[in-house]
Image (cartoon, rainbow, N blue to C red):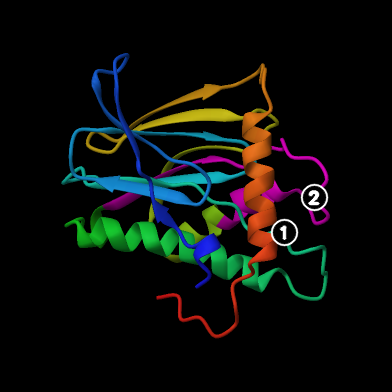
């Protein structure tokens, strides 16, 4: 797996005074999981975040990913993209299970997939991300108990794995282009480093 697209455990940890708790901030291509009473926060444009937790033990985590752009190749429905998305989901689920969560207790809340990036050649990348995460969780038998997908606004997501509570703030006025720039950089990194064919993802 090319290190440029490997899912990474978020390292940006800080104390959030507003919510009075330790917090992990995740960027595109990162994930975080915990069994502690913490908050995980991210800002999403066309990327998608899945918040997955064990509803009994409160062990949970969040990822933040985007399917690589398939370049509009109608012949193959972006199978390498889907494999990348599956890898991003698998990493989070496996880490949560390793931390002590039980598969039968897992539930998910999914967010993002906004139409905020211009200039993608294939169908709207946000919609593709949103559809992927729904299909993936359905196939894995993990129930989606809440979602806020698509639309045109970026959103900030605050997830409290221990209680399962999620707060979503729609960012109607995006005064700077940091988010869009961050996602565009991430998208070009994905495009430049496709998942190679002989990788065993699991």
Q: Residue furthest top?
A: 18
Q: Is residue 164 left or right of residue 78?
A: left
Question: Mark number for residue 69?
Answer: 1
Query: Picture coordinates of residue 121 (x, y %)?
Result: 83, 55
Residue at x-position 53% and y-position 54%: 133
Find the magenta span and give its range. 106-132
Residue at x-position 70% and y-position 68%: 78
Q: Magenta span has 110?
A: yes
| Residue 88 to residue 2: above or below | above
How packed mark 1 is, by other alpha carbons closer than 10 Å (few <14, some 14-19, many 20 or more), is many
| Of 65 and 130, the residue lying toward us | 65
Query: Picture coordinates of residue 97 (x, y %)?
Result: 24, 60
Q: Which residue is mark 2?
A: 120
Looking at marks 2 and 1 on the same chain, the residue that comes earlier in the sequence is marked by 1
Label 2–label 1 contact, CB within 8 A: yes
| Of 193 and 133, the residue lying toward us | 193
How packed mark 2 is, by other alpha carbons closer than 10 Å (few <14, some 14-19, many 20 or more), is some
Residue at x-position 76% and y-position 48%: 124
Q: Magenta span has 94?
A: no
Is any atom of residue 141 visible in this view?
no
Query: Picture coordinates of residue 85 (x, y %)?
Result: 54, 61
| Residue 124 to residue 84: above or below | above
Q: Quadrant of residue 201?
A: bottom left
Look at the numbered disc 2 and give the secondary structure of its residue. loop
Q: Is residue 111 left or right of residue 104?
A: right
Determine the CA span between mark 2 and mark 1.
7 Å
Residue at x-position 53% and y-position 46%: 28
Is any atom of residue 159 visible in this view?
yes
């Amino acid at each position: 797996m090319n290190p440029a697209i490997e899912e990474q455990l978020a390292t940006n940890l800080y104390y959030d005074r507003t919510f009075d708790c330790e917090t992990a901030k995740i960027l595109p291509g990162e994930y975080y999981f915990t069994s502690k009473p913490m908050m995980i926060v991210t800002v999403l444009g066309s990327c998608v975040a899945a918040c997955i937790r064990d509803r009994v033990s409160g062990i949970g985590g969040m990822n933040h990913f985007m399917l690589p752009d398939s370049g509009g190749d109608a012949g193959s429905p972006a199978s390498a993209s889907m494999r990348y998305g599956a890898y991003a989901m698998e990493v989070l689920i496996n880490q949560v299970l390793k931390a002590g969560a039980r598969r039968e207790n897992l539930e998910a809340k999914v967010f993002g997939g906004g139409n905020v990036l211009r200039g993608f050649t294939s169908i709207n990348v946000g919609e593709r991300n949103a559809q992927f995460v729904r299909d993936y969780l359905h196939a894995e038998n993990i129930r989606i108990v809440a979602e806020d997908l698509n639309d045109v606004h970026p959103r900030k997501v605050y997830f409290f794995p221990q209680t399962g509570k999620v707060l979503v703030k729609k960012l109607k006025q995006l005064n700077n282009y940091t988010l869009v720039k961050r996602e565009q950089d991430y998208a070009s990194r994905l495009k430049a480093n496709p998942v190679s064919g002989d990788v065993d993802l699991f």
